[in-house]
Image (spheres, rainbow, N blue to C red):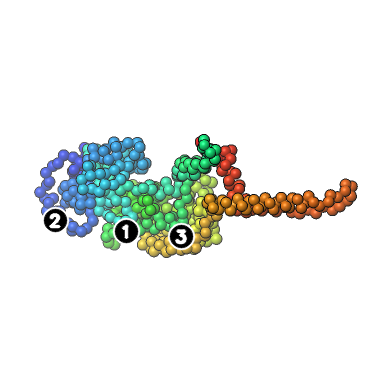
Amino acid sequence: MGFKSTLRTIVPSCFKAKKTPPESKSCVSKRHSSKRLSLLDLSNPGSPLSAGDFSNSVIGTNLHVFTLQELKLITQNFSSSNYLGEGGFGPVHKGFIHDKIRPGLEAQPVAVKLLDVDGTQGHMEWLAEVIFLGQLRHPHLVKLIGYCCQDEHRLLVYEYMTRGNLENQLFRSTSCPYLVYKPAYTNTRKKPVIIVLIVIFTYAGFSISLPWLTRIKIAVGAAKGLAFLHCEEIPVIYRDFKSSNILLDSDFNAKLSDFGLAKDGPEGDETHVTTRVMGTEGYAAPEYIMTGKLLYFNLCHLTTLSDVYSFGVVFLELLTGRQVLDKSRPIREQSLVEWARPLLKDPRKLDRLIDPRLEGQYSREGAKKAAALAYQCLSHQSKFRPTMSNVVQTLEPILDMDDIPVGPFVYIVPTEGEKEKVKEAEKNEKGEETKREKKANSHPKRPKGLRHRHRLSSSRAVYSDTALYRTLKNDLDSPTNWGKGGINWKN
């Protein structure tokens, strides 16, 4: 009963309507309209959040209130075919909003997050998400479109992010199109016809590597999102900055999501806020964890510089292509930060640090600056870490560095006109070989039994475009070669 009565005072729209106490109306007018509502306002009996639902507050001007039935229509009753994934909050499904469901709202794809009542998060995390994202708007924060609070159901409706989260892009296998050349024969002319098949498959252990500049672009976007939060009049400490909470759109623009653990930062002369230890293992700042062990009730000191450390960890994941904790690696390399910190200080060891999947295609000068920045962010003493605004200023120039090496050699299949030239060159080459053979056979043979010296000439391998084309052509035309290369192609 105590929990339910608390919900009634915080979000009355979830329950039956009741008359508003007359004294609360006078308290609303005393509040400065331009000031952002914070989580601390929930304990204030004069807050608009306790006097009426979100639609009567500053938050309500930016959000749509959906019914559970509407969200079922949007997601096709939370169909498994629309399932996107699941986090600490609960499962996420893709949906589509159109005019028939919500007149006046732009038709668009959305992501609907449903609170799992048996999960690690609850109503307060849902409420924090609504309060923060209902008021904060920035290009690098995911847009919250609306919410649903009906009976025990708690749902959130976001803009849909095409490329999912950064963790998936960096570490998980990805389906990739490949061209398969298969010769076939027509019934009339008996001439070979090349048929190009596009096969989509997932190869075990295969993942597409993000290019260097794309990784820096993602880091810049995420840093701008954090810098915006930290520079608010009431600073916002994100508290759960990690690769799975960074969403990417079709152009790899990064946006921060999941504000369930976000916290209002210190105001005025305060240096920190005291809170419970929350977050994800490997990403939390060391001083944040240590003070939690020293203080009673698992409380700790939290500052915006705690977010800077977490950013350093994610930035390190981008640079190395390694996960923050990986039990499959040797013991000394299982913790990414412990393994990488000594390498960050030495520019000569960059090749050991940078993701080998980049195959050297990165800016050397940019990598040096990035490594130095990551080392600062990961400082064990928070006072030596840069602010997120300084991080942005350091990262942005790296995008303009053009000392990236030229990519690998690419063989271009010749056109019809070029094929004729290739055939002509092959004929000339065969003619020259025949002449050389005749000339060699024309020399008189030495009689047997005579001693003579043999002249040994070192053999030379001649590599030409013609030979390369002939080899590739034979490989493509031979059915026995379709299944080679570690991939079992099916006809």
Q: Residues within 10 Å of mark 3 (few under 14, many from 20)?
A: many
Query: How many angstroms separate mark 3 from mark 2 (CA)?
Result: 49 Å
Return the residue at label 3: 370
Tell me, yes or no, whether the two marked residues, 1 and 2, touch with CB atoms within 8 Å: no
Q: Which residue is drawn at the image coordinates 59% and 52% (left, top)?
A: 422
| Disc 1 + disc 3, Cβ < 8 Å | no
| Residue type pointed to by label 2 | Ser
- What residue would you read off at disc 2? 29
SS label for mark 3:
helix
Label 1's element? helix
Mark carried by residue 160: none
> Horizontal placement of 88 versus 215: left or right?
left
In three-dimensional space, the C-alpha distance between marks 1 and 3, rounded to whole angstroms, equals 21 Å
Which residue appears at 18% of the width and 46% of the height? Answer: 53
Q: Earlier in the sequence, mark 1 or mark 2?
A: 2
User: Where residue 420 sits in the image (x, y, percent)?
Assistant: 57, 51
Residue lying farthest to the right in this orientation: 449
Hey, which quadrant is residue 389 in on the image?
bottom left
Residue occupied by mark 1: 228
| Residue 223 coordinates in the image, percent (x, y) | 37, 57
- Ranked by sequence position, the earlier of labels 1 and 3 is 1
Q: Amino acid at mark 3?
A: Ala
Please name whichever residue, 11 or 487, is drawn nearer the observer in this view of the structure.
487
Q: Nearer the viewer, residue 465 or 356?
A: 465
